[in-house]
Amino acid sequence: MWGTVATGLLGLASKVADSLFETEKDKARGTVAVLQALQSVDLAQLELNKAEAAHRSLFVAGWRPAIGWTCAFAVAYQFVLNPLLTWGFALFGWNVPPLPEFDSFLWELMFGMIGIAGLRSYEKVKGVAR
């Protein structure tokens, strides 16, 4: 996956450099400059993430766990609680309207979080320091 992303970014940087410069040497320098600019944005975001995670306030450092627990509850509701309640209502003959369900946006959020967690696991396997 990361290879695809890197290839896409390299292609984007190359197109930007091609449109701005004429010689191959200048295009290569331009490609490197665009990639360095993209990297500096990523590094700045990483530093911001570190500062947020180290903060003592729950409202600053606790948003990731809050989103994680909210997502876990939503999945548990969608696939465990909702079907059990629907079955229980039908079992007792109670006529209730359908319970609310989550749409596909829940999956987008969850897959994003799992991807981030997976990246950290990869870093731990490779021995990258905290």
Image (tube, rainbow, N blue to C red):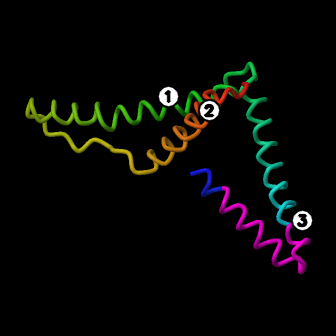
The numbered dot on residue 29 is 3
Q: Residue furthest bottom?
A: 22
Which of label 2 and label 3 is nearer to you? Answer: 3
Q: Secondary structure at mark 3?
A: helix
Q: Main secondary structure of the magenta part?
A: helix
Earlier along the polypeptide chain: callout 2 or callout 1? 1
Q: For mark 3, does the 10 Å Cα neighbourhood hold few (<14), some (14 to 19), or many (20 or more) residues?
A: some
Query: What residue did someone put label 1 on?
Result: 69
Q: Quadrant of residue 7?
A: bottom right
Q: Position of residue 122 (x, y in %)?
A: 60, 34
Question: Per the image, is 37 magenta?
Answer: no
Q: Residue furthest top?
A: 56
Q: Are marks 2 and 3 in contact (CB under 8 Å)?
A: no
Residue 104 vs residue 124, the one in the foreground: 124
For the point 86% across and 72% down, the residue is 27
Magenta segment boundaries in residue numbering:
6-29
Q: Secondary structure at mark 1?
A: helix
Q: CA distance from mark 2 to mark 1?
A: 18 Å
Q: For mark 1, does the 10 Å Cα neighbourhood hold few (<14), some (14 to 19), or many (20 or more) residues?
A: few
Above-or-below relation of 123 to 98? above
Instruction: Name the side, left or right, on which 108 lies relative to 128.
Output: left
**Which amino acid is tagged 3?**
Arg
**Which amino acid is tagged 1?**
Trp
Q: Are marks 3 and 1 in contact (CB under 8 Å)?
A: no
Q: For mark 2, does the 10 Å Cα neighbourhood hold few (<14), some (14 to 19), or many (20 or more) residues?
A: some
Q: Are marks 2 and 1 in contact (CB under 8 Å)?
A: no
